[in-house]
Image: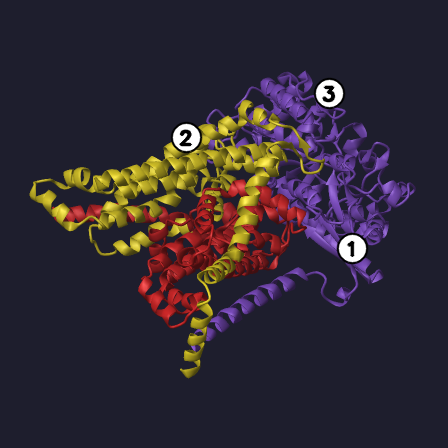
Amino acid sequence: MKWTRTLLVYLVLLTGAALTLAPFVLSVMTAFKTPEQFARRSSLSWPDPVTLENFGVLLTGRTEFGRAIVITVLAALLLVAGQLLFSIMAAYAFARMRFPGRDALFWVYLSTLMIPAIVLVIPLYLMMAQLGLRNTFWGLVLPFAFASPYATFLLREYFRGIPQDLVDAARLDGANALDVLVEVVVPLSRPIIATVTLITVVSQWNSFLWPRVITTGNDWRPITVATASLQSQYNGNWTLVMAATTLAVVPLLALFLVFQKQIVRSIAITGFK
Amino acid sequence: MAKRSTVIAITVAAAVVIVGAVGAGVAVLGSRDTGGAAGAKGDTTVTVRVWDEQVASAYEQSFQAFEDKNPDIDVKLTVVPWADYWTKLRTDVAGKSAADIFWVNNSYFADYADNGDLLDIDKTLGSDAKSAWAPSVVKQFTRNGSLWGVPQLSDAGIAVYYNKALLKDAGIDPASLENLTWSPDASADTFVPVLQKLTKDAAGHTADDADFDPASVTQYGYNAGNDLQAIYINYIGSNGGTYQDGDRFTFANPKTVEAFQYLVDLMNTYHVAPSAADTNQNGDFSRDQFIQGKMALFQSGLYNLKNVADGADFDWGVASIPAGPEGRVSVTNGIVAAGNAATEHPEATKKVLEWMGSAEGNEFVGASGAAVPAVTDAQPVYRSYWENQGVDTSKFFDVLKNGTIPAPQGANFGAAFGAYGPILEDVFAGRVPVAEGLQKAQDAANAALDG
Amino acid sequence: MAVSDGIRQRAATVQRPGLRRARRRNAIAGYAFLAPSLFGVACFLVLPVLVVIWLSFQSWDLISPARWVGLDNYRSVLTDGVFANSLLVTLVFVVIVIPVQTVLGLFAATLLTRGLPGSGVLRTLYVLPWICAPLALGVVWKWIFAPTGGALNAIIGHRVEWLSEPQLALPAVCAVVIWTNVGYVTLFFMAGLLNIPAYLLEAGRLDGAGPAALFWHVKLPLLRPTMFFVLVTSVISTFQIFDQVYALTGGGPQRRTDVVAARIYYEAFESFSFGRAAVMAVILLVILVAITLAQQLYFQRRITYEMD
């Protein structure tokens, strides 16, 4: 009785896993097929022969997916560095320093969390166009390089949880604000900093709306935009398109497999998207 | 205190390394296409934007030849896919980040011309320059007395690619395709029966068989569908209907309604063409089916000749489009390279435009068979290329002798198309009765023109 | 050591002259720490909101000069039915997606917290779609749903036009969103379930409650805060859904999947009606602020209630 129940539970759970994984598996299978096989045989058939042709076309042809990947990496690198550094500093100011207007400013930060991306895109587009930064790398990253109110918020909460005694002890040792941040707060906050880093990497890698709006053609588009425009250009060339989605998804899957515990925990802590 | 300075030093170093690495990466990415011998300091870079990959390859060679003659000018070519082309062009022109030279077509150039965004070619290259270019294209892109681009491609007319083996299987003589007539009056129509014979389901039943299963078509007869240039504007023309009167839209006239009704019936009643779900948003679906040997007749223009010739591994030929009640009427179309009025390098841009408008510069387009050059003296190269390939392109040109219907044009076409496009999709999908849908589409399009 | 002692003494003497100066120095240090981030917030979050409000009173197609039109954009957006349709579509989205993903997530979480081996791996698998780019997965699903050459029709062996049939398109897009979100929702419910003190469950069992009664009368009430969090964040994110719709349907057929964010995007960057798009953006912002405030109010009241 008990084992049939367990069996049933596994059955349900594995069905769920199969449904979750099927689109990944099917799309990767398609990415390794020749267009001829795709046209002539069932779309569920195994790739035969297995070919790298589609990836070759993407990486060496006019679509310049290699370039798109490099741009994605560079943008993510810069944005992670900028957001992390400046958010840690801001969070520390909010959590541990006293200055007039602090609470009002923090309230402003919190309020900005309610602004949806689609609302920002229109004015940001106009502002970047005014600055002559349309279709440039700097236009792609500038609006997001300085601040992440969300990261600031998460870090501030964590910083506030650090026992005041430790800070006071350092203070008595003559440490100034920077000393305290560098020597006490940051070392004690490694988990939340790791979380914020992962959140930022994932969300930058996946971001689509802003890059789609601010870039044109191959010059500065990241991988998501490259995938979308490939889909509209090579409509129906599904082997090629699935190779593109594979390239867009695999680096994150790899990151996920390496850091899966941290990522799962990060989601659970923060509910990030 | 050593610890703190170390940490800060590491942080600063890390920041410098990251910013430096990203900056270097960006610099490398930003310098492409200006590298090599031609990329010395002080060179002027002229940017050119097009939407067609085939022609882009020909342009690469053409611009290489240009750079050899003009070592102080670099030409940087960008391809922006058709699906994004017009929306991105608008944002780029507004954001002052448009290319120095960009392709425009008949439908969309008027907005930019009216807004003063394009160089007046008569002033830039002199009004005598146009004598070297295909008159039909010059005429198409002349608005308010001025020419707004250097003619580059001329699409000639529309014809029908056919798959010889599929015709043979159905017992149809390719020569008989020349005698086909379509008509809203079923008794005068000889086209549908042929298409039915050429359409098969998974069980091998043809579309005129009672057992035919439209849900499992494995071979389509024809590519009736939501395709302005290849399909419906020619049907409108050959039925004596109109699409536009000046800049205003006129789809709802009875002759146009009949033409659309005929096409919708081919798709949804006779099932001899792919469903609107496949073709509405995928302009290449039918071409791909033809190339894969799953479509017998594929009506299109010379713009697909190269794709068909490269892609099809079966014997194929070209026939005339079916005649309608008014005979064979085809659209013809051209593409021009427009100069950006806001260019920072007017002199260099002028030189590149001059080159693109010369027989020597334009010939590359024809030499690879990618498209018909619009510079008259460059055109023979195109025909001889295809003659050498054993392809007779005369059907695409002959169709124009009988009569043509003007290609869409006018200010605000983009907004109008945005308004009526989705309604036409509904018409082709059979979700709205044809007459009602076209009336709605016409109203929406004209309302959008009025802004 | 001696050097640092010296510095400490000097620091102490410098501080002595007055609290005010120390406070001012603290304030300057605080602003200095905040400066880069504040610059970002002011320029790229606060200023854009002001710009979008200003824009909502303009008529602008990007290439001709912007023109002040007062409330005309508001009038046209509120009366022409296009935006009303988008709001309705978004609402239907919320009504379909949220209950389904909540129930599935809760169900999966109860199965995964039974302590069976392999639960951790499965949990990780379920979260995969959440990690990946919604745009890329939208494109994958576009292929799966494709009427010709698509995987789903090959599986069911029958031709269905999932994304172009008006009755099917919205449920199909909803299914993709649910597929993306279930793992994420599951995570939260797992955390919530694992937080329930064992003694409460034990007490329930001693009272003779079966698994079903235990679930309905003990677990579910205790999951209320989790449930609340999941529902609110899901509603907010569903209101902003864009990438999947862009990839799958572009808002069609017949605007059946034309969610608010997609509508704003198309008004601005395809129709170039920036004024109208700005009005829609302002309205969306107001809606989201209202939802968030309502949540805050409710939350505060709940907490006091639970503390009593």
In the image: residue C122, left or right of residue C35 = left
Query: Between residues B215 and B429, which one lies in front from this camera angle?
Result: B429
Amino acid type of the residue tagged 2 in the rendering: Val
- Examine the rendering and report whether any part of residue A47 can be seen: no
| Eye-nearest disc, 1 or 2 | 2
Residue at image x 57%, y 34%? C277
Of helix, strand and loop, which one carries label 1? helix
Tell me which chain the residue with mark 3 is part of.
B
Where does label 3 land, which residue?
A: B240
Write down the chain letter for disc 1: B
- Would you say A5 lies left or right of C119 here? left
Hue used for the chain lettered A: red
Chain letter tied to purple = B
Chain in yellow, by letter, is C
| Residue type, mark 3 in image | Gly
Q: Could you tell me residue A209's position as x and y percent?
A: 54, 45
Q: Which residue is mark 2?
A: C92
Q: Is residue C279 above or below residue C225?
A: above
B309 or C183: which is nearer to us? C183
Q: Establish whether labels 2 and 3 are both on one chain.
A: no
Residue depth check, mark 2 versus mark 3: number of the one nearer the observer: 2
Q: Is residue A120 left or right of residue B233?
A: left
Q: Amino acid at mark 1?
A: Ser
Q: For the residues marked 2 and 3, what is the alpha-carbon distance in whole angstroms? A: 45 Å
- Give the CA distance from mark 1 to mark 3: 41 Å
